[in-house]
Image (cartoon, rainbow, N blue to C red):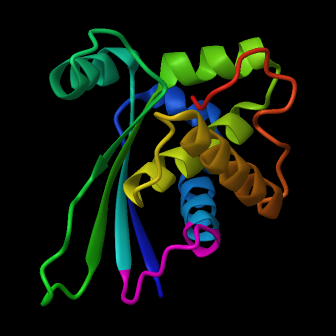
C-alpha cells in the first residue's frame, strides 16, 4: 500500500514548521499503517495548511460553527470499485489556532502538527470521539501512533479530557 499526500500551503506562516511536506508525508504514512484499517490499493490524502480565517469559513459552512478550529477532516466517501487510487479525503489545519495551542500546551509546534494530522487521518478512516468510549479508543490509538513516530503522548498533562 502506498500513500500519496497532496499538500497545499496557503498561509506563509506555516514556514515556521521545518520541512512541513516531509513531516506530513511521514506522519500520515505511519498513522495509516498503524490505524488498523486495511487499504488495499494506493491511497491519497489532501492537506490544506491555511490561516484561521479560511478554516473558520470552512467550519461555519460545513459544521455550522462560526469560529476557527485547529483541524477539520472531510472524508471522501466510498470510492468506486474501478478507482485506481482511493481518495481518503482532506485534512485542513489553521495556523493561528494550531500555533497558539502548541504554545499554551508547551509542546513543539511540529509535534502538535503531527498529532493533528494523525487525528485528522483517523477521522478520515471513520474514527470518532463523540461518545466517551469512542474518545478513549481514539485517544489511545493516537497515543500509540505518536509513540511510533517517536513523539510524546499528546494527551499527557492535559487538564481536560477529550480529543482536539
* Residue 57 x %, y %: 22, 18
Report the residue at 37% width, 84% height from top: 42
Image quadrant of residue 156? top right
Task: Please indicate whether residue 156 sits to the left or right of residue 102 in the image.
Answer: right
- Residue 17: say if magenta: no
**Vertical position of residue 137 compared to residue 33: above or below:** above
Q: At 72% from the left edge and 50% from the top edge, which residue is drawn? A: 140
Q: Quadrant of the C terminus?
A: top right
Res 114 seen here: no
Residue at 28% over, 76% down: 86
Magenta part of the chain: 32-42
Picture quadrant where residue 63 is located: top left
Q: Is residue 141 left or right of residue 69?
A: right
Up-down relation of residue 136 to residue 3 (above or below)? above
Residue 4 in the image: state x and y as whole percent.
Answer: 41, 72
Residue sitting nearer the eye, 139 or 131:
131
Name the residue at 82% across, 42% down.
Answer: 153
Front position in the image: 75 or 30: 75
The location of residue 7, given as percent across then percent down, is: 39, 53
Residue 79 appears in the rendering: yes
Amino acid at each position: 500500500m502506498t500513500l500519496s499526500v497532496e499538500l497545499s500551503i496557503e498561509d506563509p506562516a506555516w514556514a515556521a514548521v521545518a520541512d512541513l511536506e516531509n513531516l506530513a508525508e511521514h506522519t500520515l504514512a505511519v498513522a495509516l499503517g498503524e490505524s488498523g484499517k486495511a487499504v488495499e490499493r494506493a491511497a491519497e490524502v489532501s492537506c490544506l495548511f491555511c490561516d484561521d480565517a479560511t478554516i473558520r469559513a470552512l467550519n461555519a459552512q460545513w459544521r455550522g460553527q462560526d469560529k476557527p478550529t485547529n483541524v477539520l477532516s472531510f472524508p471522501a466517501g466510498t470510492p468506486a470499485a474501478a478507482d485506481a487510487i482511493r481518495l481518503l479525503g482532506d485534512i485542513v489545519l489553521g495556523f493561528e489556532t494550531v500555533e497558539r495551542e502548541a504554545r499554551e500546551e508547551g509542546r513543539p509546534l511540529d509535534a502538535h502538527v503531527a498529532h493533528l494530522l494523525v487525528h485528522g487521518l483517523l477521522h478520515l478512516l471513520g474514527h470518532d470521539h463523540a461518545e466517551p468510549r469512542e474518545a478513549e479508543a481514539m485517544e489511545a490509538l493516537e497515543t500509540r501512533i505518536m509513540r511510533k513516530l517517536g513523539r510524546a503522548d499528546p494527551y499527557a498533562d492535559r487538564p481536560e479530557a477529550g480529543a482536539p
